[in-house]
Image (cartoon, grey):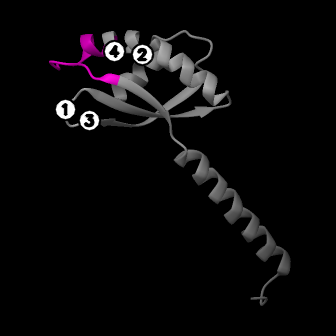
Amino acid sequence: MKQEIADILMRKIKDPRIGFVTVTDVEVADDLRNAKVFVSVYGAEKATTLKGLESASPYIRSELGKRMRMKFIPELLFRYDESVERGAHINELLHEIQEKDDEKGPGHE
């Protein structure tokens, strides 16, 4: 489902509110009624992108219905995945620490 949604977003959706979006995970509820679609957004306003995704949700569901053999296509709930942003921030902090250590030179603990 994750790959299919990503493909639909990349190839079929032309909404200008939806910029460069990566589908990072999909969690389908046990009863198959809902699916949380986690996305990371690059270089665009998150709230605007999520609104665009929500408005495209019925179309995405219909495309999923054509592509996947499921009795019921779940309702898609788009959520922003903050883990990518947090990972980039941690990486930035580690890089700063490394630069400070390099400035001190060898032998300074």
Q: Identify the element where label 3 is drawn.
A: loop
Q: CA distance from mark 2 to mark 3?
A: 17 Å
Name the amino acid, label 3: Ala
Q: Nearer the viewer, mark 3 or mark 4?
A: 3
Q: Which residue is mark 4?
A: 61
Judge from the rendering whether residue 74 lies leftward or rightward of residue 7; answer left or right.
left
Q: Which residue is mark 2?
A: 57
Return the disc, 4 or 1, that comes first in the chain's sequence.
Answer: 1
Q: Residue at x 25, y 10 (%)?
A: 66
Q: CA distance from mark 4 to mark 2?
A: 6 Å
Tell me where residue 74 appears, x and y as whole percent. Answer: 28, 23
Q: Residue at x 70, y 57 (%)?
A: 92
Q: Which residue is mark 1?
A: 31
Q: Residue at x 35, y 28 (%)?
A: 3
The boundaries of the magenta stretch are 63-75
Name the amino acid, label 4: Arg
Q: Nearer the viewer, mark 4 or mark 1?
A: 1
Label 1 Cα crowd, 10 Å radius (few <14 / some 14-19 / many 20+): few
Label 4 Cα crowd, 10 Å radius (few <14 / some 14-19 / many 20+): some
Tell me where residue 11 appears, x and y as whole percent. Answer: 46, 14
Q: Which image quarter holds the C terminus?
A: bottom right
Count every numbered label the image shows and give the total: 4
Q: Is residue 91 one of those drawn in magenta?
A: no
Q: Which residue is mark 3?
A: 29
Return the disc, 1 or 2, that comes first in the chain's sequence.
Answer: 1
Q: Nearer the viewer, residue 54 or 90?
A: 54
Judge from the rendering whether residue 63 lies leftward or rightward of residue 85; answer left or right.
left
Name the amino acid, label 1: Asp
